[in-house]
Amino acid sequence: MKSMPWVFGAYLLVFASPALAQSDAPCALSRVEGNTAYVLREGKSLAAQSGMDIISSDSLRTGDASRMTLSCTSGVVVTIGPDTWIAVDQVAPQQGEIRLFDGIAGFVLNWRKPGVFQIRTPSAIAAVRSTEWVMQVKSGATSVFVRDGSVDVTARKGGGSLGPGDGIDVSDQSVAEPVKRWGQARIDLCNELLGHYW
């Protein structure tokens, strides 16, 4: 696992990003890598750029050589890996919902007051209060790994509560396997996909 100093860097992105300080938008792209990253807004595809405001109802897509970081004034930081498609349904203080249709994303949630944040995939829902975790969707199946804090994962059949180092796999039919400790090789693969900012 990566060292804790990076986590403090992520929090600085949330609270010190000039784009967020100058805008009323709930979120902004604090980092964009590669040239195949797009924001889908009102039927238009816009090239993603650092500092770009992101609003509820926007979708974000990356190609196979691109990554983005979404930083929100609410205290949510989302690291979006390659070949990923997410939709920002709502990100507000102490509540939010993002849909992860395909690909991999890492989440850091730093809320000072209790709240609920949900990530929905085609086969599972992860509900968290304050934590760091990764979700990956491939062919409709979902994998969740918790780096810090706790995450409750719900599927049509099964689910569980995950703590640090725990992971769960949910099939494309929304059937959850038991919660288990992930091996370092699998954690390293997630870290590699998300890049050194994660």
Image (cartoon, rainbow, N blue to C red):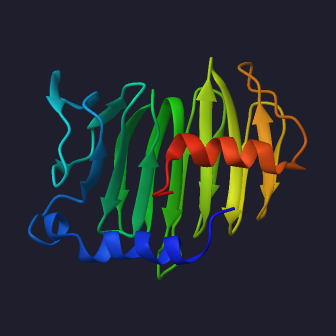
Residue 139 vs 75, above or below: the answer is above
Residue 14's place in the image compared with 155, above or below, is: below
Which residue occupies 75% across, 31% down?
Answer: 156
Q: Observer-nearest residue: 94 or 28? A: 28
Between residues 62 and 178, which one lies in front from this camera angle?
Answer: 62
Q: Which corner quadrant holds the N terminus? A: bottom right
The residue furthest left is: 22
Q: Position of residue 87 (x, y in %)?
A: 37, 36
- The residue lying toward the viewer, choosing from 94 and 14, is 14
User: Can residue 42 be seen in the rendering of this structure?
Assistant: no
Q: Residue 183 placed where, x, y %?
A: 85, 48
Q: Quadrant of residue 30?
A: bottom left
Q: Which residue shows up at 34% across the image and 30% down it? A: 61
Residue sitting at x 81%, y 55%? 166
User: Which residue lies at the image location 76% right of the left edge and 42% below the top edge?
Assistant: 186
Residue 131 visible to an observer of this rendering: yes
Above or below for 92 versus 99? below
Q: Position of residue 120 (x, y in %)?
A: 55, 39
Query: Which x, y percent locates residue 198?
Result: 51, 57
In the rendered structure, the answer to whether residue 78 lies left or right of residue 24 reads right
Q: How many numbered discs, if any? A: 0
Q: Is residue 56 left or right of residue 175?
A: left
Q: Residue furthest bottom?
A: 112
